[in-house]
Amino acid sequence: MYSPKVMEHFNNPRNVGVVENADGVGEVGNPVCGDVMKISIRVAEDRIADIRFQTLGCGAAIATSSIITEMARGMSLEEAAGITKKDIADALDGLPPQKMHCSVLAADGLRAAIEDYRKRDSRLRV
């Protein structure tokens, strides 16, 4: 059902936890399946310098959270905000159709963290 890469990220998730004094935090959930993801980021020179996640959900939710942190680290905010559900699923060598919503949550969680950073940053510039 799951690719070896999904199982690897589920069994050995990367970047679990919270970024201390995060510059942006995004929290998203799916009321149908109950998955909840929280992604925190630190930004330096318009790039994601650090990224961590906390996820309550199924194996696919944990795997997509883990892989998006690896994908986004070092990217510009614009590049990271452009990561799609397909990019995430492809990076995991595929997801079952009934688990694609997990890749949507991961992408939405990262975009929410970036949006939170931009809101905070714009208030600091005033």
Image: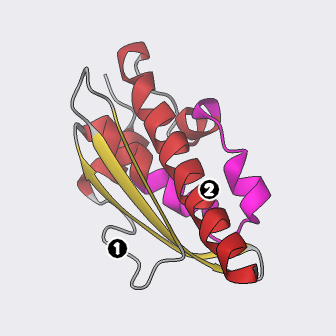
- Residue identified by numbered label 1: 18
Q: Main secondary structure of the magenta part?
A: helix
**Residue 48, image x, y percentages:** 64, 72
User: Tag 1: Cα neighbours inside 10 Å, few (<14), some, or many (≥20)?
Assistant: some
Residue designated by label 2? 115
Q: Image quadrant of residue 28? A: top left
- Residue at image x 25%, y 39%? 59
Quadrant of image for the C terminus:
bottom right
In the rendered view, does 73 fall on the left or right side of 92? right
Nearer the N terminus, badge 1 or badge 2?
1
User: Can you see residue 107?
Assistant: yes
**Amino acid type assigned to the residue bearing label 1 in the image:** Val
Q: Is residue 85 above or below residue 115?
A: above
- From this view, report whether residue 117 is shown above or below residue 38: below
Residue 95 location in percent, x, y?
44, 26
Q: Which residues are magenta?
A: 66-86
Q: Name which residue lies at 69% across and 50% down.
A: 81
User: How many marks are shown on the rendered structure?
Assistant: 2
Disc 2 marks a residue whose amino acid type is Glu
Q: How far, Cα to Cα, is label 1 from label 2?
A: 17 Å
Q: x, y (%) of residue 6?
A: 38, 41
Mark 2 closeness class: few <14, some 14–19, many ≥20 residues within 10 Å: some
Q: Position of residue 27 (x, y in %)?
A: 39, 51
Horizontal side of 40 relative to 114 (left or right) equals: left
